Image (spheres, helix red, strand yellow):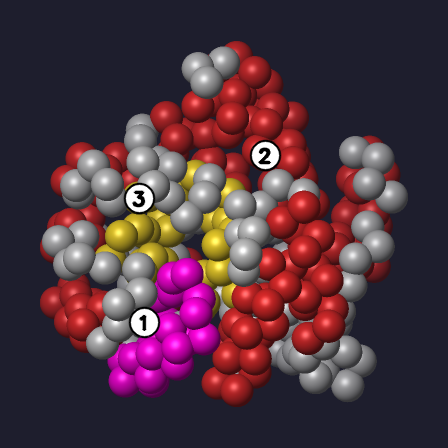
């Protein structure tokens, strides 16, 4: 099966102390991630603080990451929003840059009904030749894209995957049951990577792979080669770290961890803030435990 890769890392966006985007740091981080377990990168997604990036910043990030790793890894542009026509325009401009695909988050705040969700994604799909990943994350959008809607969208030629972050394994299994064999289901939760693989998923769009990408590759490779015991052992080993990455709002923990291991993840744009002293100590303690600092 042709995929975008087994592990796509939802890359953080480095900001300088003046809160401008540090494009050089983004290029360096992209190269680091691809050298350490990432088959591809999702740029300007939720973990990339997309809500505080303007259109020009997103396009420059897409171009920067493409230049850095586009010949070695899949580059997926986060072009979705709750404004259908703005998403159309950004997706079209990302396509002109040469990205390998685009990820479209479910419209947030508007809370459209299922038919509105379908028409939103269909309108974007009809405007581009890029392969598209739907991103279902009800915890952020307040709307759950139901399996029936995903199945309808999977009939469109360039809607090829979903990042499923509902946390509902039964829903994931239903999507896999009702979509074509070539339709790809990615886990949107690091801790559910192995369970979703077990019901037919293809991989993970990950936060934790910033730090443990190589180990996650070992886990998925073991599963694919039917070494289930090894895959389960690695999953059990990584669960505490997966939890650590969500002790407060994503991407606060992972961006902090990226900085602590010597990469430049940069600072945060409001309304996100640095971790509390207690949160910072927890992150440091765990990184010490796994010999990353």
Residue range (magenta): 80-104
Q: Position of residue 23 (x, y in %)?
A: 68, 75
Q: Residue furthest front?
A: 71
Say above or below: 34 vs 61: above
Seen in the picture, residue 174 relative to 75 is either above or below; the reply is above
**Residues under labels 2 and 1: Cα distance?**
30 Å
Residue 184: mark: 3
**Secondary structure at numbered mark 2:** helix
Q: Earlier in the sequence, mark 1 or mark 3?
A: 1
Q: State how far apart marks 2 and 3 are (Cα).
A: 19 Å
Q: Which residue is mark 2?
A: 216
Q: Is residue 209 above or below residue 18?
A: above
Disc number lying in front (2 or 1): 2
* Residue 247 visible, this orientation: no
Q: Is residue 82 magenta?
A: yes
Circle 1: is it few (<14), some (14-19), or many (20+) Cα within 10 Å? many
Q: Residue at x 72, y 83 (%)?
A: 19
- Please tell me how crowded label 2 is: few (under 14), some (14-19), or many (20+) other residues with Cα within 10 Å: many
Q: Nearer the viewer, residue 7 or 276?
A: 7
Answer with mark 2 or mark 3, whichever residue precedes in sequence.
Answer: 3
Which residue, given by chain and number where applicable, does mark 1 sit on? 107
Instruction: State the residue at coordinates (53%, 45%).
Output: 39
Please give left or right for residue 133 compared with residue 41 in the image: left
Quarter of the image for residue 94 reads: bottom left
């Amino acid at each position: 099966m042709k995929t975008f890769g087994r592990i796509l890392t939802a890359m953080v966006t480095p900001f300088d102390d003046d809160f401008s985007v540090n494009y050089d740091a983004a290029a360096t981080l992209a190269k680091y991630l691809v050298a350490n377990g990432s088959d591809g990168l999702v740029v300007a997604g939720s973990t990339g603080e997309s809500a505080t990036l303007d259109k020009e910043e997103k396009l420059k990030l897409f171009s920067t990451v493409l230049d850095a790793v586009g010949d070695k890894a899949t580059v997926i542009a986060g072009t979705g929003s709750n404004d259908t026509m703005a998403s159309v325009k950004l997706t079209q401009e990302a396509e002109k840059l040469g990205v390998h695909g685009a990820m479209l988050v479910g419209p947030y705040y508007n809370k459209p009904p299922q038919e509105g969700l379908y028409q939103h994604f269909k309108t974007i799909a009809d405007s581009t030749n890029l392969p598209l990943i739907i991103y279902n994350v009800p915890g952020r959008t307040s709307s759950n894209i139901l399996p029936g809607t995903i199945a309808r969208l999977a009939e469109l030629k360039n809607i090829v995957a979903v990042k499923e972050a509902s946390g509902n394994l039964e829903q994931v299994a239903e999507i896999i049951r009702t979509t074509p064999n070539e339709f790809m289901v990615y886990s949107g939760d690091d801790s559910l990577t192995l369970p979703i693989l077990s019901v037919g998923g293809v991989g993970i769009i990950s936060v934790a792979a910033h730090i443990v990408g190589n180990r996650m590759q070992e886990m998925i490779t073991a599963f694919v080669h039917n070494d289930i015991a090894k895959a389960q052992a690695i999953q059990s080993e990584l669960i505490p770290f997966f939890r650590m990455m969500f002790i407060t709002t994503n991407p606060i923990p992972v961006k902090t961890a990226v900085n602590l291991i010597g990469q430049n993840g940069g600072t945060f744009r409001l309304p996100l803030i640095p971790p509390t002293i207690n949160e910072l100590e927890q992150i440091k303690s765990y990184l010490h435990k796994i010999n990353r600092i």
